[in-house]
Image (cartoon, rainbow, N blue to C red):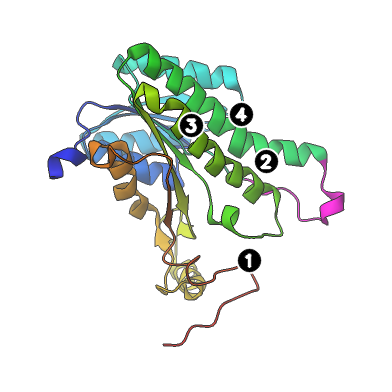
Amino acid sequence: MLERFDLDGKAIVVTGGGRGLGRGMAHALSEAGARVMLAARTQSQLDATAEEIRSRGGTVATFAADVTDSKQVDALVAACVREYGRIDVMFANAGGGGGPNVDFWEYPDDAFEQVLATNLKSTFYSCRAASKAMVEQGTGGVLVTTASGTALRGNRGFAYPTAKGGVISLTKSMATMLAGHNIRANCIVPGYVSQNDPKDEQEREQRAQRGTFMPVQRLGEWWELGPLAVFLASEASSYITGETYIIDGGGLAGGLGPIKFRPQHEW
């Protein structure tokens, strides 16, 4: 059974791979045997994560790119094919940015466009470029996207959940369109997850307090997305496509809402 989780030799691109959840997933994929290409805008973050992976015996390359630019994304996928001879999995993980905190009718066009570009358009560009290469290889592949729990409920910062809701819908559509080419597509929906280790005791206490919003009474850790990433990239999930995987400590199940609407739990 464990052999089906093996990613030995697989060529995997992780966008947003320089820090946070992308970093955690990249570590896990490498430890499962994958050859990883990290992509992000900040080269110093890419270099730091790549050095961590190499120090553990992993194979990793980096490519600085702004994934809101489709030409740069095309170049990223081409670089993976040059480096490893193929691309087997695309983790379209890059995203972020909620835009200004203003009344709905005051929300500016350029801010909305930027949030869509960072989260939804970048995912489309990444999966489009990767799927084209996979079809040309004739071997199929896997697309994994990253959305957000905010996409599954109302939220005052509407632009970000709107974009992430689009990511979920895009993933389902890609699964149906690309199944005939042996390409699977699934979506990871993280809840509140710490992006790195706490820098001091004060931050540790703040995270512990925030964790009381969760039924499990703690925040997730960045590395906890790794096993799910390996599962979705591997043959262990060979009959799964078009699905959305929520990893949030039971937050949505427990009724977690926007900030300032804290649920009450009886223990």
Residue occupying image coordinates x 82% and y 43%: 108
Image quadrant of residue 38? top left
Residue 114 percent coordinates (x, y): 70, 37
Mark 4 or mark 2: which comes first in sequence?
A: 4
Q: Secondary structure at mark 2?
A: helix
Q: Would you name the residue on which mark 2 appears?
A: 115
Q: Looking at the figure, which quarter contains the N terminus? A: top left
Residue 153: mark in rendering: none
Mark 2 or mark 3: which comes first in sequence?
A: 2
Q: Is residue 98 magenta?
A: yes
Q: Would you name the residue on which mark 3 appears?
A: 174
Mark 4 or mark 3: which comes first in sequence?
A: 4
10 Å neighbourhood of mark 3: few (<14), some, or many (≥20)? many
Extreme residue in the right direction: 106
Extreme residue in the bottom direction: 267
Rounded to the nearest angstrom, the CA distance separating label 4 from label 3 is 19 Å
Residue occupying image coordinates x 42% and y 74%: 217
Residue 258: mark in rendering: 1
Residue 68: mark in rendering: 4
Task: State if disc 3 and disc 4 touch (CB < 8 Å).
Answer: no
Q: Which residues are magenta?
A: 97-108
The relative height of residue 125 versus residue 239 in the rendered view (above or below) is above
Rounded to the nearest angstrom, the CA distance separating label 4 from label 1 is 27 Å
Rounded to the nearest angstrom, the CA distance separating label 2 from label 3 is 21 Å
**Which amino acid type is marked by label 3?**
Met
Q: Secondary structure at mark 1?
A: loop
**Which amino acid type is marked by label 1?**
Pro
- Front label number (4 vs 1): 1
> Camera-side residue: 135 or 36?
135
